[in-house]
Amino acid sequence: MGLSKTELPTGDAPDRWEAQLRKGALEMAALASLWGGRLYGLEIIRFLDSQSSLALAEGTMYPILNRLKAEGLLTSEWVEAEAGHPRKYYSLTQAGIQRLRLMAEAWNNFSRGLDRLLEPVLEKQEAR
Amino acid sequence: MGLSKTELPTGDAPDRWEAQLRKGALEMAALASLWGGRLYGLEIIRFLDSQSSLALAEGTMYPILNRLKAEGLLTSEWVEAEAGHPRKYYSLTQAGIQRLRLMAEAWNNFSRGLDRLLEPVLEKQEAR
DNA sequence: GCAACATACCTCGTAATGCAATGTATATGG
DNA sequence: CCATATACATTGCATTACGAGGTATGTTGC
């Protein structure tokens, strides 16, 4: 029947999370960095760099933060610093918390899937 | 001095593998699917779908296979099928094997990093 | 006061990439 | 010979990562 071509029964739009993850992994990381409380932009970058060796450029992070805020997953507030430029602190909203949980679960599926796939590759790295 | 802007000391170009992984994850999966021996295009898609719940569209896979072949990581050969259209079987080259190993290690770093980040998120999913 | 510097946020342009849609080739069955 | 099934391939669009460049604010040295 009609259904011919490019369609594994992936499920349409609602939760193509597995697909969104290959992308959204960075958004997920940004959300996750705020789990312990509010951080400001550069701080998020430094946090991810040190905690998970995810090195993101500012030109990557700021657009992500804006997107997440536009989606209502984050809020932001300006805070004066003792010195220098004021800082924009980001916090998770309730929606952000829920979304992060969903993404984290999807991430586990995705990454366990790949791990399974790579298992043979990393096995006994000698005879070959 | 000059070094002001967008530069965490990421290491320049040679092996921004962590960066390449967020992308290249799909290329890695394609390579990994061939670890056990040659497969043809659609077969790779089905294999990934079943073994790791990675649902890739044909329009995604064929370009990837072409890229990998152009890089010398794969070879391909036409094989007549008993029925229908002939199949193009892909196999890993030595270079492909080595690259896959590198990617697999980088993947482990990357994914362990994210796992660490998400640990608190998935903890004790009740009181909240 | 005013450079020079440091910190912080923001944005534009480009290249890459995932994918739906669409097309072609080959064979089988009614 | 037309509909169907399998398989490979390409084009166009939307999204994205990120380098480069820019603006804002405050400090320190002269």
Image: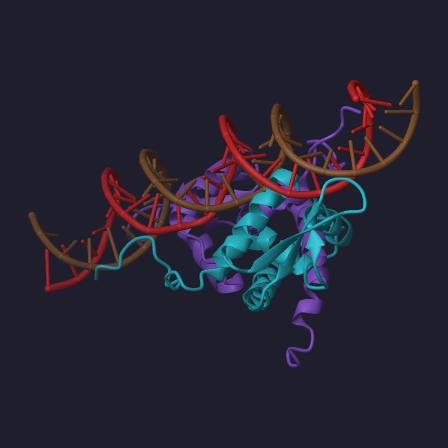
Chain colours: A cyan, B purple, C red, D brown
Residue B42 coordinates in the image, percent (x, y): 40, 52
Query: Relative to residue A77, is residue D29 drawn left or right?
Result: right
Residue A115 coordinates in the image, percent (x, y): 63, 60
Badge count = 0
Task: Please name the residue shown 56% across and 44% down the image.
Answer: A63
Residue C20 coordinates in the image, percent (x, y): 33, 51
Query: Relative to residue C24, is residue A126 drawn left or right?
Result: right
Q: Residue C5 occupies which quadrant of the picture?
A: top right
Task: Please name the residue shown 68% across and 59% down the image.
Answer: A34
Furthest toward the bottom, the residue is B127
Query: Relative to residue A80, is residue A58 drawn left or right?
Result: left
Residue B25: tell me if it is visible.
no
Choose between A35 and A28: the one closer to the eye.
A35
Residue A51: tell me if it is visible.
yes
Task: Please name the residue shown 53% across and 38% down the image.
Answer: B68
Choose between C24 and A62: the one closer to the eye.
A62
Task: Please name the residue shown 60% across and 47% down the image.
Answer: B22
Q: Quadrant of the N terminus of chain A?
A: bottom left
